[in-house]
Image (spheres, helix red, strand yellow):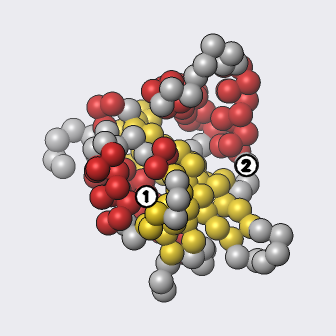
Amino acid sequence: MGQGIMNTIRLIKAKDVQQVLDLAYKAVFERGWVGTDFDKQHFNIQVKNVISHQFNRVVGMFKGETLVGFAVAQLEQNIWNTEIKCHIDLVHLDVNHRQREYYQLLLDSLISYCKANNIKHIRTSRNSWLLEELDRLDFLHNNRFVETDSNWDWHNEN
């Protein structure tokens, strides 16, 4: 770790919006979610809404002041109970930082937040993570997620 600037994880701030927009576009493009009818202006508005929504937690991984990755988690509550659940919608790292350890740092940040706020249930989808299929399965299993169908659930046992 003594080589160069270390990566840090922190909440996305207003000053980071352009970097998030650039990396978010790469995230959806790389996953094949950009079709011929893609409206980049609408996309930019949606990303800004996600960042600013009070029930979302958006953390970024920075190398110095440069955004190299992010994770988007939506906090949700069903109308029939007061339990808050966390859904990790999208985790993306730029190509040069796409390492399992960096995905782990982003996930650990979200898990720590959930534990501190008594959120006992985290859900994610295999499409949220750009890891090779076997590595992705191993990563999710090692982090105590269980496959319930196309979603993966994590439960805090504390």
Q: Position of residue 20 (x, y in %)?
A: 55, 33
Instruction: Tell me which corner region of the image, top left, top right, bottom left or bottom right, holds residue 87.
Output: bottom right
Tell me where residue 84 appears, x and y as whole percent. 68, 71
Visible in this render: residue 62? no
* Residue 13 locus on image (x, y percent): 60, 43
Of the numbered discs in the image, which one, if any, rests on residue 107?
A: 1
Neighbour tally class for label 1: few under 14, some 14-19, many 20 plus, Cα within 10 Å? some
Seen from the viewer's position, the closer of residues 143 and 113 is: 143
Q: Earlier in the sequence, mark 1 or mark 2?
A: 2
Label 2 amino acid?
Answer: His
State the residue at coordinates (43%, 45%): 129
Question: What residue is shown at x 34% (from left), y 55% (from top)?
Answer: 137
Residue farthest along the bottom direction in this orientation? 158
Q: Give the answer, above or below, for where 134 lies relative to 45.
A: below
Classify 44 as above or below 106: above
| Residue denoted by label 2 | 53
Of residues 65 and 82, the one drawn nearer to the viewer in this rendering: 82
- Whether 24 is drawn above or below 135: the answer is above
Most distant residue in the front direction: 149
Indicate left or right for 65 with 151 as reference: left
SS of the residue under disc 1: helix
Cα distance between the residues tagged 1 and 2: 20 Å
* Amino acid at the residue labelled 1: Leu
